[in-house]
Image (spheres, rainbow, N blue to C red):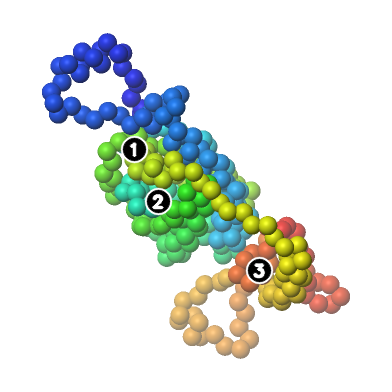
Amino acid sequence: MIPAESDPTESRSASAAADSDAAPANHSLLKKNSQDDLLLRFYQKVERKLDPLLDAFLSEVLECKAKAESSEAARSTFIDWLSRQINDSVYLEFHLGAADAPILVRIGRTFLTASVDCFFGGQFDGQEYAAGTLKTSEIAMIDRLAGAIATVLTKGWSALCDTPVRYTGCYLGADEIELDLENEAVLVSATSVTLSGHRIAAMDIVQPLDGLIAIEPQLNRPHQKATNELDPVWAANLKDSVEQIYLPVRSVLGRPTMRLSELSRLSVGDILPVSPTDNVPLIIGDRVFAHGSIGEQNGGVAFQIKQFL
């Protein structure tokens, strides 16, 4: 909650009655609709870049199509936001540059387990079945998501400054979080992600105003980028050279997991079941390039492309 501005007469009376140790005034960021509301407008520039970045990096990490949609950041207090967290979630902590106040990203447990399903070639069925102790695969997925989100936040903030955002740790429950904030105000952006045709309340991005205040001098500097004029002959030769590069192309029908004891008993002729799917990834290098299905053509196995990423 953002404190309302008081009546000027009342303020002068209170000031006269206060002792010499009066509390410092609120930062100008909290005075909405004034010229000092600059930081909020700065942060909105970052927000506008996040959805397309999340689409690209989540699709890459999960090896399936992901579509993110974020709400405009709403003002709250950190305590109020934390008190509303009733579902199973994990909370990732990130730091922007040298700012002490972290950026928190809440990851819903349903989104986490759906991400694991999609990564291993499955389909999320839209059921909220996630609960209990984290599985090994979910813990591994947390690290994958954290790396992607750190990159997304870094690229989002590049609209204002070249300051990296780094992942610093994970809280497994809301009761573990303790933040030392001078100002309890935060900006909360709720993000949903569509996987396998199902929209999931996936994450909250929580930006403390303390963090914005700490980097205000950096944001107020003009952000300029040098531009160079390209030699058209050089650019054409580079394009021709790049188009002659050979890249490994492969597809993955399934990623079964087995215990070591089961692996040790495998022998020639054993059959490992693979679930039929029309969402087989086509991988070029280390990136998923398209999705399709496996079929037959002219007596051989063929891959039919259904969707480019």
Which amino acid, by three-letter code, is at mark 3?
Ile
Name the residue tied to disc 1: 78
Question: Looking at the image, which residue is at 33% across and 46% down?
Answer: 101
Which amino acid, by three-letter code, is at mark 1?
Phe
- Number of the label disc, if any, that sits on residue 96: 2
Q: Image quarter for residue 231?
A: bottom right
Q: Nearer the viewer, residue 288 or 86?
A: 288
Q: Nearer the viewer, residue 281 or 243?
A: 243
Label 2 SS: strand
Q: Is residue 11 above or below residue 97?
A: above
> In the displayed image of the protein, which residue is found farthest to the right?
298
Q: CA distance from mark 1 to mark 3?
A: 42 Å
Callout 1 touching callout 3 (CB < 8 Å): no
Question: Looking at the image, which residue is at 51% across and 50% down?
Answer: 158
Name the residue tied to disc 3: 283
Q: Nearer the viewer, residue 47 or 19?
A: 19
Q: Image quarter for residue 9?
A: top left
Q: What percent of the width, then of the height, locates residue 108?
A: 45, 48
Label 1 Cα crowd, 10 Å radius (few <14 / some 14-19 / many 20+): many
Give the quadrant of the C terminus: bottom right
Give the quadrant of the N terminus: top left
Q: Is residue 119 above or below residue 226?
A: below
| Residue 161 falls left or right of residue 64 | left
Label 3 SS: strand
